[in-house]
Amino acid sequence: MNMLRLLSLSLDKCGLQFSRDHLLLRDGAIVALDWVVGECEGGRRSSPPVLLLVPEHWGSLTPHLCSLCHSASALGFYVVLFHHRGTAGCPLTTTRLTEFGDPADLDQAVAYIHSRHPSSVLLAVSEGSGSGTLLSYLGEKGSGSRITAAAAFEVKMRPSSRASARQASAVALNTASSVISQ
């Protein structure tokens, strides 16, 4: 597994800056990992938790995920978005797209994230069709998963429902905080 690192990219996704890693997978495919860049309000702990977000298969950043990025980053989490091969500006370098629920690419991404932050707790939140991938990964890995806790959302958040997005983000972050403190 190789990683091609791009310098900090300023992607205008809901007012956040991201640094993109292109992860070269065993079969020659590339997935993108977008890390939220920015300072947190209270400073970072020595090994802050990592929040992995798995969006819809087409990689759209919904208001819910955007709100979650802001909230988690402000609380000191490292936040990373996983993008499937061929989505969100990630080049398609193989003739194979990710099939619904196929966790192989996510498995390699989780291994890379763990190698980058080996002392950090890894949490995951998925939305829509990304939930099929996350739940398949958890089902296949079982107790061997490097993910400590996960939440899968299937509810569609419309831009007009920002209050609902904030509430869902608060629930996810409260759950994550209680897992970390145990």
Image: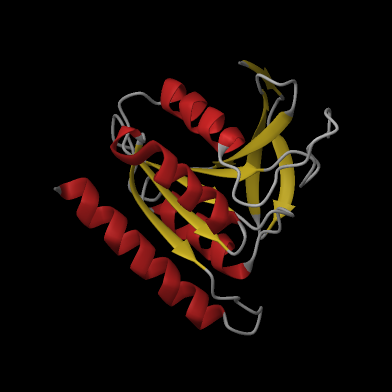
Q: Residue at x 39, y 37 (%)?
A: 141
Position of 122 with respect to 62 (left or right) is left
Q: Quadrant of residue 158?
A: bottom right
Location of residue 152 in the rendering, given as x and y in whole percent from the top left corner: 46, 61
Q: Residue at x 69, y 53 (%)?
A: 57
Position of 168 with respect to 160 (left or right) is left
| Viewer-proximal residue among 25 and 139 | 139
Q: Quadrant of residue 93?
A: top right
Is the residue 48 above or below the residue 117 in the image?
Answer: below
| Viewer-proximal residue among 59 and 10 | 59
| Viewer-proximal residue among 63 and 87 | 87
Position of 67 with respect to 181 (left or right) is right
Q: Is residue 77 visible?
A: no
Location of residue 78 in the rendering, given as x and y in whole percent from the top left corner: 44, 40
Q: Quadrant of residue 157?
A: bottom right
Is the residue 146 above or below the residue 155 in the image?
Answer: above
Q: Residue at x 51, y 24 (%)?
A: 112
Location of residue 127 in the rendering, given as x and y in whole percent from the top left corner: 55, 62
| Viewer-proximal residue among 97 and 64 | 97
Is the residue 137 above or below the residue 20 in the image?
Answer: below
Q: Is residue 168 visible?
A: yes
Q: Residue furthest top?
A: 2
Position of 22 with respect to 128 (left or right) is right
Q: Quadrant of the N terminus?
A: top right
Q: Residue furthest bottom?
A: 160
Location of residue 113 in the rendering, given as x and y in whole percent from the top left corner: 48, 29
Q: Residue at x 70, y 55 (%)?
A: 13
